[in-house]
Each structure stands twice: as C-alpha cells, then as structure tokens.
Image (cartoon, rainbow, N blue to C red):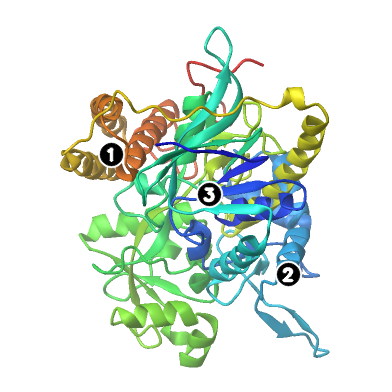
Amino acid sequence: MSTENQFDVLVVGSGASGLNLALEMADFARVAVITKADLHESNTFYAQGGIAAVLDEHDSIESHITDTLNAGAGLCDEDVVRFIVEHGRQSIETLAKYGVEFTTQNDPEGNAEYHLTREGGHSHRRVVHAADATGQAIETTMEQLVRKHENIAVFEHHNAVDLWCERDVHGRTKRVTGLHALNTKTGNIHAFSAPFVVMATGGVSKVYLYTSNPDICTGDGIAMAWRAGCRVANLEFTQFHPTCLYHPKAKSFLVSEAVRGEGGLLKRPDGTRFMDDFDERGELAPRDIVARAIDYEMKRLGADCMYLDISHKGENFIKEHFPMIYAKTTEFGFDMTKEPLPVVPAAHYTCGGIIVDQRGRTDVAGLYAVGEVTYTGLHGANRMASNSLLECFVYSTAAANDIQERLHRAKIDEETLPPATPPWDESKVTGSDEQVVIAHNWEELRHFMWDYVGIVRTDKRLKRAQNRIEMLQAEIIEYYGNAQVNGDLLELRNLAVCADLIIQSAQSRKESRGLHYTLDYPRANDNKGLEPTVLTPKRFPST
C-alpha cells in the first residue's frame, strides 16, 4: 500500500540541523520532517558538552580558527573553518531566540553572562552549554516549536528507503524528486515528493560494536546519497570518544569531555596518571590522541578499562557542573564525587560524509545535506570538541537561505518543478521468515568493523574487512531484492554500504593522520596526505 505526500521541502532526520532548517523554512514553505523514531531521538539529544563560539573578550575568531586547524591535522578547509567560526555568535543568538536556556553566571558588575567551559583542543573557554545536557535542552526546545508550526508536518517512525531521482538517458541522476519511506508502525511504504530534499540523518557510528550514539545512527543519509550519485569524502576519519562509561548495562553512556575540561584526570587501574606520557596537553589533548592513549594502556596492561577521576573537585562542584552525569552514573552504582569512573573509547562521530558546498548543496540537483552526515571541510582529520553543533546551525541556516531563494524562483516558473514520486512497487517480493539472517549479519558487520577498522588499523586488517564486506553486501543485495523491507533490513543495507566506503577510504590513505592511525604507516605524509579522500560512485550525476 502506498500514499503520496507533496511538500516544498523534505527534511530527513530530526536532530539540530534538521529541526533548525525546518524552522528556518517554515514561514516560506510546506515542510515535512521525516524521522525514524520519536522526533527528539537524535545524536543532538544526547550531546552533553555544548556549542563552541567566540563570546569572551579575551578570545578571538583567529584563535578559534587556529585551534580548529590544529585539531584537524592539516586537512581542514580554512575558508570553511572561517565561515563557520565567524557565524558562531549568530548561532547562539538564534538558539536564545528559540528559548534555549544556557547556563549563565554573573560578571563582576553582577550582570548575567554565558558560562563558558573549555574542552580538548580549545585554547580558551568558549563552549556555551546548558549544564551537562546541552543537546537535550536544544532538542526539546526546538521540538516544541516544530510541533506547533502549522507549516511543518512531522512523520515519526518513518524509515527513508531511498531517494527518488529523475535520470537522463544514460542513467545519470539529473535531480531529486522525493523519496519513499517505510512506516515502521504499519509496514506501509509512502511516497513523498518535493523539489528539495535535505539529508540531516547524522553519522554512522552504529557501524561499530561500541558506540556512544543511539541506535538510529546507521548511516542512512550517506548510503542513500551515494546510491543517488553523490560523492563522499574522508570517511576513514571516525572519532572515537575517549570516555564512555564502562558498565554492562550502561550501553556506552558518554562521560562528557567537559569533565576533563573542568579538571578530570585519566588514570590507570593503579591510580597513576598517563596522559602526560602521550601529549604535553595531558587530558586536554585532542580526542584522537586521548582515545589512542587509553586504547594503548588497556592493551598494554590487559585492562578492561581506564579511569576518569574528578572526585578531587569536591561534591558541590561536581553536582553543580555535571548533574546529569552524576545522576546517571549513580544509577549504575558509582559515586563520582568519591571515586573514579571506569571508561573506554567508543565510536562517537563521523568526520566525513556527503560532499557539500557552503550552501549545503550536494552533487545532485535539489538534494542538500547538513550536519554530521556531511563533509564540509570543517573537521579535517579530527573534529574539535563542540564544533559539530556549531556546524549544524551554520550550515542548516545557509542551506535554508539557499533553498528559500531557489524555491521562490521555482514557484514563479512551475514548469521547473519535478514530477511526483511514483508509488512503491513491491509486487515481486515476498515476506521472509528469516529475520535471523538480518540479525546475524548485523552483528557480524559491527564486530569485524570494530576488530579490523577501529582505533588502530593495519593493511592486513583492512583487507580482511574488505573481504567480509564484499561477501556480506552480496548476501544483503540478494535478500533485499526478494524480501519485503523492514526497518532492520533497511538499516543493515545502509550500514553495509557505509562500512564499504569507510574501508575503501582507510585503504587509500597510506599514512597516519588524525583519527586514522595505521601501524603500517605510523607517520604523516605531508607530501601526499594533505588532500581529502574522495570516493565517486559509478553513476556520477551530470553537471
């Protein structure tokens, strides 16, 4: 069964970038927000740290740019970095206008000002936050605005299946015209049409066995855009957050980098510190260095975890600055005011993705992408803490402005509007009683990605991963072509595509840089390594 829905803009994903773009567009267009879980369920909701922006008189735009370039290990696009950093204050003002209540403090004259914290890689305090639950404050505030707006239709529990594109006689993509989405509550697949589609689906950290991300982060936007004809870049750079709570029931609960920013110390099981052995910045070194240091110490000692200790700061300080982390860790039996927390690295952020320009445009006409799903050039080989939410707002605003201008032109000349998306055809497929196949392949993929394409890599490990993903994709393609789709199958299909792209990207970078570390090439190659890794699909769209 299939129904058709016509809008001006389709937004796939409901994190910070997707909801901001919807709100920016809603006064000028009919917008659909398509999301595969509840509207608030996103990486944004779980973000603890904050948003990096230059607001302090002792800080500067140039300092923020320099810190970002340093963290990115030579692969950042400096023009993009400047563009984003220069719009930091504007993004905070937008969020304040929405009603987000950031943490404040009084200045010497008794006036309220934003409390700024410092995180790894930053040379100044410039992270605006809402206690230690910034993402939750942002997401819930924007969710309320989205639900109230009469021009925004929300489709929860809808898995996007694939983009629908108009193609030329050679099979190359001309422009996007909409998409199909599976209603996971009813099993029906619905057709959505629009002249503009925005991918805001987040990253692909669920491709790894251990991740700080919610279950929805399965690389759907990257995979769909790749199949439609978009190039991708820098997918070898997955950021592993150094400090996720180590507990069998915690499901990789994130212990914010702000804990280290406020004086938390990393320690071995015997209580000795180790970060000074790896970097002069100690606990405030960039995440790639901290994650590798923890991984190294765990393997060297045969330890299950390392420990993060902020108990020396005192009970009042900890409860005031980290109320959510304190409450959550207490649920698991820890008292961070009196003892260190056991921590391990986990896949956290995808630094590469769909290639976009400074307006959020992809290679396919009418298709935009914003947020973690993209490669903009901001993060380079390693994302600096709290730059990601900043990127979300700057680029979703830029994309909204561009779409608004193009939509206005399209409405003047209605002949330029694309044809409607046709109904979904599943006449040649049958139901399957082999759900165990999907579950088995899902687990196998995440295990070998963790073992072979994780924090430390080798050519041999990557080759093993390549062999496995080729076999797995063949099975998935055959299964997908003959069985009725469901949410698990769609996610597995997309994870497999992204895993293949990650492996290809890692194999092509013959050096160690930022988040990509290989024992076969332990040094950076500044002669050949200073360009992004770009992969191009076979059916590249016509220009």
Q: Of 114 and 366, which appears nearest the observer?
A: 366
Q: Residue 383: percent from the left, percent from the top?
A: 55, 50
| Residue identifier under label 1 | 452
- Residue type of the residue flagged with mark 2: Ala
Image position of 422 (left or right of 62): left
Across and down, in percent, residue 208 comes to 33, 47
The amino acid type of the residue labelled 3 equals Gly
Amino acid type, residue under disc 1 in the picture: Tyr
Image point 77% across, 61% down: which residue?
89
Q: Are marks 1 and 2 in contact (CB under 8 Å)?
A: no
Secondary structure, mark 3, is loop
Q: Tell which circle, 3 or 2, labels the residue nearer the N-terminal end.
A: 3
Q: Secondary structure at mark 2?
A: helix
**Cα distance in 3D space between marks 1 and 2:** 44 Å
Which quadrant, please, contains the N terminus? top left
Instruction: Determine which residue is flagged by label 2.
Output: 96
> Which quadrant holds residue 408?
top right
Tell which of 349 and 480 is nearer to you: 480
Q: Secondary structure at mark 1?
A: helix
